[in-house]
Image (spheres, helix red, strand yellow):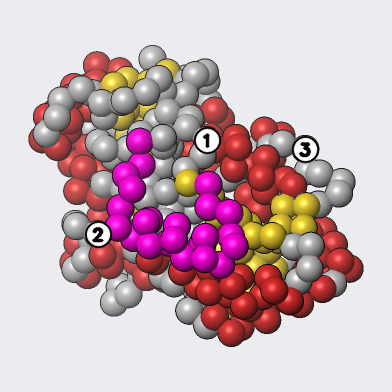
Amino acid sequence: MPRVAIILPARESFAPDRAGAIAMVSFRHASIDQETVVFGGKQSAAPYSGVRFVEIRRESVFGFGLGVLGGLIRLRPSVVEVHQQPRFARLIAWMMPGTRVLLFLHNDPLTMRGLRRRVQRAATLRRVHHVVCVSTYLRDRYRTGLIEDQNLVTLPNPLTLDDLPTPSSVRRQEILFVGRIVAEKGVQDFISACKIALPRLPGWSARIIGGDRFGPDSPETTFVQQMRAGAVAADIIFEGPQPHRYVLSAMAAAAIVVVPSRWPEPFGLTALEAMASGSALIAANTGGLPELVGDAGILFVPGDVGALTRAITALADSEAERARLANLGRTQAAAYDTAIIGLRLGILRSG
């Protein structure tokens, strides 16, 4: 019988080249214990190998929930990790009182169904064994208005450092943006800053990798078209969505990676990957990014194109500063290795 069951959101892709942060983190959680089973919705591509995956092919959320519950009752795991589904976590805890239920939150709880009201957040803490937030920022958001929070913990997202490409010893003079091409990720600020900075930086180039969503079938939305046109006008390479391994290889070669998010990032997995890859990092000072980056990168006010331009120019002009930040970033990222985070996760799983 499996010791751990992980429940993904019904629409979450669990395929290597289509997975977002939640699926990638869940895959790393699953790799910690070989007896783990991952439950997810209908997949459009082959799921991660090396992990037992149960596909619930029912289209409706209600049907998905029934399918998962049936699987859990048959498998009887000792631990259930529910990602991003507070109402479902409460139901599982009620139906399976002998099972340890952990609710993992990857987004702002004050915007999530089942947690927006203080009474819902308090009830969830009483019902499940732990509510696990991926950053202190999210934990503090969850605590809003609460008196008791003893079951509320922070566990950062892991990154398996041994799986990353070997960083290049000679970095490409490139300024790189990686992420979804949506307004809240700040890609328009990246384009504006590079348009100003690049003419002042002979020999340097800029590149954008990403699409509206993950995977090769990402739609060419109006916003993506606008950003593509803006990038071309600014002499920035716009590659569109690419496989995750390609993205990691690009980070392993680029001198500078920019994470210019306009919205409060719940964690900032792209920033962690950039630091682990040996790039000098520039990131927006918002959400969970400051606690993740620490002093291992340059932080700027979200949306401040002038500040971003100055940060890019300063780093491009100083090889010594890029090397200093790269070394700090690698040290910072080492604390997030899956083996280390896995030890902390094991404590939560065992009680």
Nearer-the-camera pick, 349 or 317: 317
Residue 166's tag is 3
Q: For this view, does 153 lie left or right of residue 159?
A: left
**Are there few (<14), some (14-19), or many (20+) residues within 10 Å of tag 1?**
some
Q: Nearer the viewer, mark 1 or mark 2?
A: 1
User: Is 235 part of what is drawn in magenta?
Assistant: yes
| Residue found at x 14% / y 30% | 59
**Are there few (<14), some (14-19), or many (20+) residues within 10 Å of tag 2?**
some
What amino acid is at disc 1?
Pro
**Are there few (<14), some (14-19), or many (20+) residues within 10 Å of tag 3?**
some
Q: Residue 128, image x and y in percent? A: 30, 48
Q: Quadrant of the N terminus?
A: top left
Instruction: Using the rendered image of the protein, determine whether residue 268 is visible from the camera's viewpoint.
Output: yes
Dot 1 or dot 2: first in sequence order is 2
Dot 2 or dot 3: first in sequence order is 2
Considering only vertical position in the picture, is 259 above or below 168? below
Considering only vertical position in the picture, is 129 above or below 275? above
What range is drawn magenta here? Answer: 217-239
Q: Secondary structure at mark 3?
A: loop
Q: Secondary structure at mark 1?
A: loop
Q: For this view, does 179 lie left or right of residue 196?
A: left
User: CA–CA distance between discs 1 and 3?
Assistant: 17 Å
Residue placed under numbered mark 1 in the picture: 243
Dot 1 or dot 3: first in sequence order is 3
| Residue found at x 41% / y 23% | 47
Q: Secondary structure at mark 2?
A: loop
Q: Quadrant of residue 223?
A: bottom left
Residue placed under numbered mark 2 in the picture: 112
Nearer-the-camera pick, 198 or 67: 198
User: CA–CA distance between discs 1 and 2?
Assistant: 29 Å
What amino acid is at disc 2?
Met
Callouts 2 and 3 close, C-beta under 8 Å: no
